[in-house]
Each structure stands twice: as structure tokens, then as C-alpha cells.
């Protein structure tokens, strides 16, 4: 993946929009986040298991590991994700409309894919976002 993405997110009463340039391949993930005017909102790099994330606007509680994990849940190979999640005691389902992650019978993450959009809802942490791009 090497493309621009439009991200619209919500957490509680807060809404957030950003443009991200994302380059992801078998070697890792690189993201540059900016607002509509092109001002930098943050940069993320994930290579060789190391995550570097810096942002002048995101709270420190939004660690790069959460961004990487969400990205992997949306786009990484289902077979590899299923194995990793099962090793953590979670279950993973995938169909032609998206993916779901459960803790026991409780749905904790719902990922819906349609056309050029991915809708991610984390029911456990109560946040969601939509990514729009040419996937």
C-alpha cells in the first residue's frame, strides 16, 4: 500500500479529521498525518518490531502501538491475524463484508469494508473511525 487516506474519527464527544500518507509493505509501515491545509499532525514508523510515533496534537495516551495494531487488524493477512489473536485468547472472524474480533461472546472490534472505505469500531475502548482511499 502506498497511498493517501482520508480519516474521520470520533472518541466520546471529540471528532477528528486527518489526511494520512501511508506506505505499508512486508518491511513495515510509514505514516505521515496532516490536516487539510497540509500542516503536520504526526509521523509514525514501524520497522523491525520498533514503533516511533511523534505528534504535536495527539495525546500521549494515543501510543503508536495502538495505531499500528488497528492498521494491522484492518489490512493484514487474516490467517496471521487469526493465529496471533487466538494466542491472546481472542477470536477472529472474516467474511466478504469485514472482520470481527471477540473476547468470548463479546464483540470488541468490528471492521466493515465497503468500496473505498473501511469503518473501524472499537467497542471496548469506545472509539471509531472511517478510512477512505483507493484500496
Image (spheres, rainbow, N blue to C red):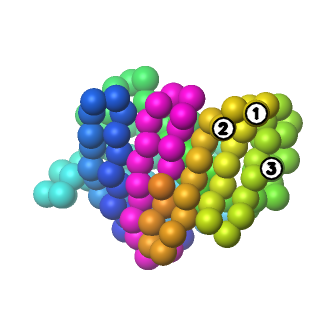
Helix, strand or loop under label 1? loop
Q: Residues within 10 Å of mark 1 (few under 14, many from 20)?
A: few
Pick whichever of labels 3 and 1 is earlier in the sequence.
Answer: 3
Q: Is residue 122 magenta?
A: yes
Helix, strand or loop under label 3? helix
In the image, what residue occupies the spot 30% across and 58% down?
19
Residue 19 visible to the viewer: yes
Helix, strand or loop under label 2? strand
14 or 72, which is in the foreground? 14
Residue 47, image x and y in percent? 61, 49
Query: Image height check: is 65 above or below 29?
Result: above
Q: Residues within 10 Å of mark 2 (few under 14, many from 20)?
A: some
Tag of residue 105: 1
In the image, what residue occupies the spot 73% across and 59% down?
94
Mark 2 and mark 1: span between their CA atoms?
Answer: 7 Å
Residue range highlighted in magenta: 120-135
Name the residue carrying label 2: 107
Mark 3 and mark 1: span between their CA atoms?
Answer: 16 Å
Residue 63 falls left or right of residue 109: left
Pick whichever of labels 2 and 3 is earlier in the sequence.
Answer: 3
Residue 59 falls left or right of residue 68: left
In the image, what residue occupies the spot 27% across and 43% down?
16
Mark 2 and mark 3: span between their CA atoms?
Answer: 15 Å
In the image, what residue occupies the spot 41% across and 70% down?
133
Query: Image height check: is 49 above or below 58?
Result: below
Name the residue carrying label 3: 82
Residue 44 falls left or right of residue 87: left
Amino acid at each position: 500500500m502506498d497511498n493517501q487516506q482520508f480519516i474521520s474519527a470520533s472518541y466520546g464527544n471529540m471528532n477528528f479529521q486527518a489526511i494520512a500518507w501511508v506506505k505499508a509493505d512486508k518491511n513495515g509501515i510509514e505514516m505521515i498525518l496532516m490536516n487539510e491545509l497540509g500542516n503536520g499532525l504526526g509521523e509514525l514508523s514501524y520497522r523491525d518490531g520498533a514503533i516511533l510515533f511523534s505528534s504535536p496534537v495527539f495525546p500521549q495516551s494515543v501510543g503508536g502501538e495502538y495505531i499500528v495494531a488497528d492498521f494491522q487488524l484492518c489490512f493484514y493477512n487474516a490467517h496471521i491475524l487469526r493465529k496471533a489473536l487466538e494466542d491472546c485468547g481472542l477470536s477472529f472472524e472474516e467474511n466478504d463484508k469485514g472482520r470481527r474480533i471477540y473476547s468470548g461472546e463479546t464483540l470488541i472490534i468490528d471492521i466493515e469494508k465497503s468500496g473505498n472505505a473501511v469503518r473501524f469500531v472499537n467497542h471496548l475502548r469506545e472509539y471509531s473511525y472511517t478510512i477512505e482511499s483507493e484500496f
